[in-house]
């Protein structure tokens, strides 16, 4: 298993994994397949300040991905990031998600982010266990917020504080600045 920064040419494999989750689970709220073009546009807009990572299997095929993204667009939210991780179903429970999150969290902390947030559709014990293993704690729940598979779904919100204190936050660094 090898974790590395995602490249433009990885977006197609990322979309395949995400679309599988959207088609088969309530963990992803997309209700129809998303296009590689829409994901590529998101990658282009965010990958410099929010890491996109892939996990490659022994055959060098992408078997999972994790990424950071902006929490909200207003400037005061700049030091918060949302995180997500998805793994090809044939590789669930084999450590890819854990390896991806370990590296993603390390990078986001080095960049200067203060708070990480994750939304987890309930119930999802595997995702909840993964987040808890990294120190995330559940801080709230939006009830009946998503309609999928002919029923309502709640989404729990989880947070991880990376930097304690009430002082002025430092300047955020780009992904490239912390990788070098």
Image: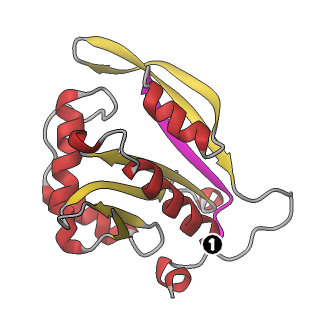
Q: Is residue 153 left or right of residue 62?
A: right
Q: Is residue 14 above or below residue 144?
A: below
The picture places residue 96, in percent across and down from the top left corner, at 37, 51
**Relative to 50, 6 lies left or right:** left
Could you tell me which residue is drawn at 48 percent across and 36 percent down? 119
Identify the residue at horizontal 23%, vertical 56% (top origin): 14
The residue carrying mark 1 is 110
Residue 30 coordinates in the image, percent (x, y): 24, 36
78 versus 150 height, above or below: below
- Residue range of the region highlighted in magenta in the rendering: 112-122
Element carrying mark 1: helix
| Residue shown at the point (63%, 65%) measured from the top left | 109
Residue 180 % position (x, y): 51, 88
Q: Is residue 150 magenta?
A: no
From the top left corner, tell me how far across and down residue 3 is, in percent. Answer: 38, 66
Nearer to me, 29 or 59? 59
């Amino acid at each position: 298993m090898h974790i590395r920064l995602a490249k433009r040419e990885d977006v197609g494999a990322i979309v395949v994994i995400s679309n599988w989750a959207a088609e088969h689970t309530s963990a992803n709220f997309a209700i129809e397949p998303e296009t590689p073009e829409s994901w590529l546009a998101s990658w282009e807009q965010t990958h410099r300040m929010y890491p996109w990572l892939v996990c490659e299997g022994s055959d060098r095929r992408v078997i999972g991905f994790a990424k950071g993204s902006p929490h909200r667009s207003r400037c005061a939210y700049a030091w918060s990031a949302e995180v997500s991780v998805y793994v090809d179903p044939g590789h669930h429970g084999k450590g890819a998600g854990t390896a991806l999150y370990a590296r993603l969290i390390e990078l986001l902390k080095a960049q200067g982010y203060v708070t990480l947030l994750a939304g987890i559709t309930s119930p999802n014990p595997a995702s909840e266990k993964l987040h808890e293993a990294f120190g995330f704690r559940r801080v709230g729940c939006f009830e009946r917020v998503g309609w999928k598979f002919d029923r309502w779904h709640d989404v729990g919100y989880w947070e991880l504080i990376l930097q304690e204190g009430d002082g002025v936050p430092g300047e955020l660094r780009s992904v490239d600045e912390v990788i070098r």
